[in-house]
Image (cartoon, helix red, strand yellow):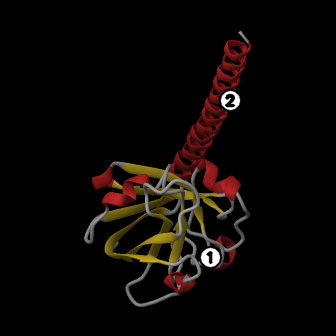
Amino acid sequence: MLKRRALFWLGSAFMFCGAAALSLYSFNLWDAIHAQRLAKEWLNAAAATRPAPRPPSVRSTVRRGDVLGELGVPRLDMSVLVFEGDDADILKVGAGHIPGTALPLGEGNIGIAAHRDTFFWPLRSIHPNDLITLRTPEGTSRFEVTETEIVRPSYVQVLNPAAGRDLTLVTCYPFSYFGHAPKRFIVHAKRIG
């Protein structure tokens, strides 16, 4: 009888923990969907009014959490809104512009990061010559994938400016790894329009 009662309480505890984990996952998913929807509405409204291009000094005054644009890979049917910043709160709701890298429509290497198990999951199937778009209120830039590589997390040189390296996407690797992945998957692309 005691064994049966202990198994009942153990089973109940597992069910409660599972329900709590599912609830937390559902809340985080809803939060990300809501943030993406609001950001897309803002981007569409800003693009519709499309002000005259701002000088680089004005563009560089972005603040953490500002919507910068929408990143897309048409062949992979991937689309994600990009926010300023790359901390955990930003990456929970979208892709993040890596501070210190070029801003969209600026000169240099634009760095964008996102989680491999959410917004950048489709990147596992990206290939050289794939088209990447980056839509901002000022217009849409097009990039062509030149290469992918796998590096250690400490190898930040992938974000350095280099000829033909106008956009760099960063996510954890391997894609199917459970927990904190030990490497980074890098996508390099050059501007084509």
The residue lying at 54 percent from left, 45 percent from top is: 40
Check disc 1 and report the residue beneath it: 55
Dot 1 and dot 2 residues touching (CB under 8 Å) = no
Q: Quadrant of the C terminus?
A: bottom left
Residue 152, which numbered label? none
What element does badge 1 sit on? loop
Q: Position of residue 1 (x, y in %)?
A: 71, 9
Q: Is residue 146 above or below residue 90?
A: below
From the viewer's perspective, is residue 150 above or below residue 64?
A: below
Where does label 2 land, which residue? Answer: 17
Relative image position of residue 150 (x, y in whole percent)? 42, 75
Residue 38 placement: quadrant: top right
Where's residue 130, x and y in %?
Answer: 28, 65
> Residue 76: x and y, percent?
31, 52
Mark 2 closeness class: few <14, some 14–19, many ≥20 residues within 10 Å: few
Residue type at mark 2: give it: Cys
User: Residue at the spot x=64%, y=23% of the render?
Assistant: 15
Alpha-carbon span between mark 1 and mark 2: 53 Å
Q: Is residue 62 left or right of residue 156?
A: right
